[in-house]
């Protein structure tokens, strides 16, 4: 279905035709200038004064009509701008079924997506900022906002040294947070949660962006609608664990490339290097550009992907951890290792070198309970039994 012509175009055409008709009418009725010069004695007669008065009335009417048309076209411009600004929203919600013409797509305003860098007391934030500035396609479309907590002077100086290349904001409340006695050692996690809440409010409510990419030791993406949903119930601590709870997750999942686009290089932090030495320092960054925006990603639509995913996972032969460790399995897989309880998951994960933590039943990097990984060049699925339907929040 083709889109209707722009209201601005139709209005402009109508005004052009109408104005020319009025102009021709006025010129036809206008007294001869040459005649007036040749007969100066007739200028004072009553008939000419009447005609002059009629001409003046016509011009007044023309001006009134022109003013009305001008006001109308301004109104149409405003309406058109509103339609253009909300076009992408309607398209995403499925309210618009027609494709935008190529010429309109080429001239539509690009979306600005800021990069929010969460910083505290690591001067090594410089490595992160250098890479972001080096690889972002456009400073205008991807402005960098660094939100700093902790009040660490050396880190603040590093961030400030980038000048106009970024925006530096500072979380103002550096006080300790009252915590339960048993959580005293987790004070840092409470401060992180406070910082994230403040930073998100700055991005969405102060700077009025609709989408943000968050970079700390990893990368996340969030949107205005999601923030409006979760901000009122934002937790005092452990916000990333809280996000995996069914009340927040609501059966939603993140689409991500399997080969990481982010790398953590800091052992120092509130987790005291809990996972760094065993897992995180081995992260391998992607080195090949992939033009995702030019690819057909329809296979990632949930219904289609789930059918294909379950077929591959549960069509794979079941093997044991010992089979995988022995190196006797031939071929590149896939192979399936099946767990049936939180304890069996943790045991198998540890033996296979996979992170073993569960939050509200959700394994780290898991989808539908399945953790996919490569072991000695073989694709392996650490999976629950076939027929899985939902996570068990008691598995934590």
Image (cartoon, rainbow, N blue to C red):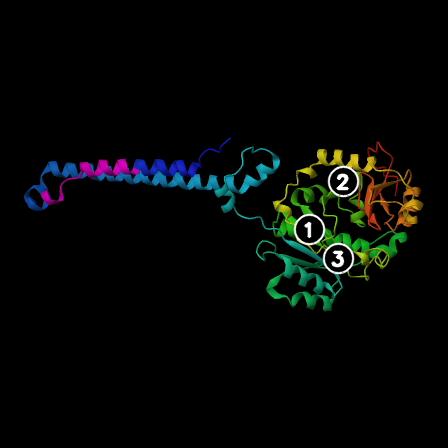
Give the foreground label among 1 and 3: 3
Q: Nearer the viewer, residue 26 or 260?
A: 260
Circle 3 is placed at which residue position?
Answer: 263
Q: Give the residue drawn at x 75%, y 57%.
A: 263
- Where does the image place residue 36, in percent across and percent down from the top left? 10, 44
Q: Which mark is residue 315?
A: none
- Say which label, 1 or 2, has the lower sequence index: 1
Q: Nearer the viewer, residue 183 or 226?
A: 226
Direction from residue 159 to residue 184 in the image, left or right: right
Whether residue 360 can be seen here:
no
- Where does the image place residue 369, in percent across and percent down from the top left? 83, 39
- Where does the image place residue 178, in percent across and percent down from the top left? 83, 54
Circle 2 is placed at which residue position?
Answer: 249
Q: Give the residue drawn at x 34%, y 41%.
A: 67
Give the foreground label among 3 and 2: 3
Label 1, label 3: how far apart the Cα atoms are: 22 Å
Q: Secondary structure at mark 1?
A: helix
- Say which label, 3 or 2, has the lower sequence index: 2
Circle 1 is placed at which residue position?
Answer: 200
Q: Give the residue drawn at x 69%, y 48%.
A: 221
* Residue 21 on the magenta segment: yes
Magenta segment range? 19-35
């Amino acid at each position: 279905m083709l889109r209707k012509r722009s209201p601005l175009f139709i209005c402009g055409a109508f005004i052009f035709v109408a104005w020319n008709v009025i102009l021709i009418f006025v010129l036809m009725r206008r007294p001869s200038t040459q005649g007036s010069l040749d007969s100066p004695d007739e200028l004072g007669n009553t008939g000419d004064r009447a005609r002059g008065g009629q001409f003046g009335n016509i011009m007044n009417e023309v001006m009134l009509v022109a003013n009305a048309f001008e006001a109308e076209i301004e109104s149409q411009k405003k309406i058109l701008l509103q339609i253009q600004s909300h076009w992408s929203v309607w398209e995403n919600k499925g309210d618009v079924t027609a494709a935008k013409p190529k010429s309109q797509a080429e001239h539509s305003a690009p979306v600005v997506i800021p990069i929010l860098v969460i910083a505290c007391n690591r001067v090594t934030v410089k490595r992160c900022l250098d890479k972001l500035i080096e690889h972002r396609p456009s400073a205008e479309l991807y402005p960098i906002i660094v939100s700093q907590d902790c009040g660490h002077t050396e880190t603040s100086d590093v961030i400030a040294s980038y000048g106009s290349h970024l925006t530096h904001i500072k979380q103002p409340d550096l006080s300790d947070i009252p915590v339960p006695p048993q959580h005293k050692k987790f004070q840092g996690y409470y401060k992180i949660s406070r910082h994230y809440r403040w930073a998100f409010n700055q991005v969405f409510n102060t700077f009025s962006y609709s989408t943000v990419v968050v970079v700390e030791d990893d990368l996340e993406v969030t949107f205005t609608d999601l923030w409006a949903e979760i901000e009122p119930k934002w937790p005092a601590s452990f916000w990333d664990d809280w996000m995996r709870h069914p009340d927040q997750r609501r059966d939603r999942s993140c689409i991500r490339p399997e080969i990481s686009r982010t790398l953590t290089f800091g052992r120092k932090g509130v987790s005291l290097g809990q996972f760094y030495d065993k897992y995180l320092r081995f992260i391998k960054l992607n080195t090949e550009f992939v033009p995702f925006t030019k690819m057909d990603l329809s296979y990632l639509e949930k219904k289609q992907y789930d059918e294909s995913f379950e077929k591959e996972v549960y069509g794979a032969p079941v093997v044991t951890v010992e089979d995988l460790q022995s190196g006797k399995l031939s071929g590149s897989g896939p192979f399936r290792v099946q767990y049936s309880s939180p304890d069996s998951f943790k045991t198998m994960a540890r033996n296979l070198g996979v992170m073993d933590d569960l939050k509200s039943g959700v394994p780290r990097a898991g989808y539908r309970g399945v953790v996919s990984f490569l072991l000695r060049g073989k694709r392996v699925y650490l999976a629950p039994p076939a027929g899985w339907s939902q996570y068990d929040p008691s598995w934590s």
